[in-house]
Image (cartoon, rainbow, N blue to C red):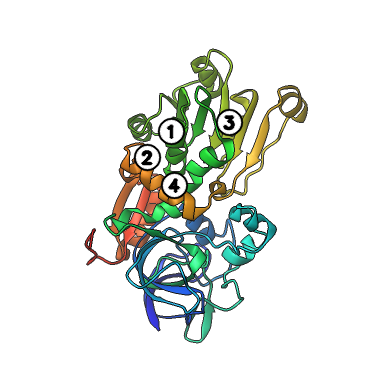
Amino acid sequence: MKIKAAVVDKQNADFEIRDDVELAKMGPDDIQVHMVASGICHSDEALRTGVAVIDYPIVLGHEGSGIVEKVGPEVTQFKPGDHVVLSFYGCGNCKSCLKGIPTQCENYAANNLSGVRPDGTAHFTENGHDVADMFDQSSFTSTTVVRERNAVKVDKDLDLRGLGPLGCGYVTGSGTVLNTLKPKPGDTIAVFGTGAVGLAAMMAGRISGCTKVIAIDIVDSRLKLAKELGATDTINSNDVDDVVKAVQDLTGGYGVNYAVDTTGVASVISNSINALAQGGTSAAIAVTNHHIDLDTWNDLCVNDKSVIGVNMGDSIPQVDIPRLIEFNKLGMFDYQKTEKFYKFSQINEANADSVSGKTIKPVLVIDEDYVPGK
């Protein structure tokens, strides 16, 4: 079937919405999803600009939400009419998946970042030529086909338009804290960068009972929002001579137990390590091609610090996304305050606003006729 999709033809090209893209036929464990909305993530920009490369032309988008239209004969968890949030695909069969760590799936790159479906076939074609996909999802479309394991069922009374970013940005930031770092009540945490991922990590720090939740950025409006969402303290790094000292001053001179860097900027990553207390851990979770130098003697050995990378918040989407929704209902994870809705036709404007930082989490409303709760 032909669908509407936003195609990027080559590196750094704008998104072009076309209505002649052919969607792959459904497999036995596939579901066909009518897309309602999709968040825009910095990972989409990394692929558009070639920082991370799959192939071109490509249909991006991996924070989708929509309504199931059809299901394959082997699908057991979904039926037409179900509302879903889409996320990454884990094979479910490798050792990591069987251990409950699908973000470390041995086939993760092949299944999500190869540009083709897990079985090696094209997700999309145009005029007889293959078009690459992302996350076996490609949510910048009017309709897509995904594996059953890509989808998470959500209640129909929830507004689908804002839920898509739970599938990547929000689950990545919060999962890094809740699943990986696992701070205890009374611990301290600093989050470098207050975009959607950073704010999600910061809210998770507050949920975990951290007594110091320090948000660090260069944009005052974002730091103000961080305060509204639960930061105990904020630091504008443009306003202080030494960010590390500023963090230490807020923690009795010790530094923080945990830090999360969402910027990918080498100097900021270094600050996140230097701001740790002895025995602390810093998580680097940005998609970046930058590199840092580590003092393996003083930092990693003598001060017993740890530096880790975390993919997708070590999340199990079918567990973590419903948990975030419950936290939201309790007023503890107010992600809606980070979002701004755009029409699908405004995709290039929305992406530019994401890159510039004007909008924390742009959300494309693909189905403008959708009515929440129906």
Q: Residues within 10 Å of mark 3 (few under 14, many from 20)?
A: many
Q: Is disc 2 in contact with disc 4, using a CB cutoff of under 8 Å?
A: yes
Relative to 50, residue 301 above or below = above
191, 19: nearer the viewer: 191
Lower position in the chain sequence, tag 3 or tag 2: 3
Q: Is disc 3 in contact with disc 2, using a CB cutoff of under 8 Å?
A: no
3 or 1: mark nearer the eye: 1
Q: Quadrant of residue 330?
A: top left
Residue kind at label 2, given as amino acid type: Phe
Q: Is residue 36 left or right of residue 112?
A: left
2 or 4: mark nearer the eye: 2
Q: How far apart, in angstroms, are the residues tagged by discs 1 and 4?
A: 14 Å
3 or 2: mark nearer the eye: 2
Relative to 189, residue 73 above or below = below
Residue kind at label 1, given as amino acid type: Ile
Residue at left offset 56%, top offset 35%:
182
**Which residue has dot 4 on it?**
170
Q: Is residue 316 left or right of residue 350?
A: right
Relative to 184, residue 14 above or below = below
Q: Is disc 1 in contact with disc 4, using a CB cutoff of under 8 Å?
A: no
Residue at left offset 64%, top offset 57%:
98
Q: How far apart, in angstroms, are the residues tagged by discs 3 and 1?
A: 21 Å
**Which residue has dot 1 on it?**
207
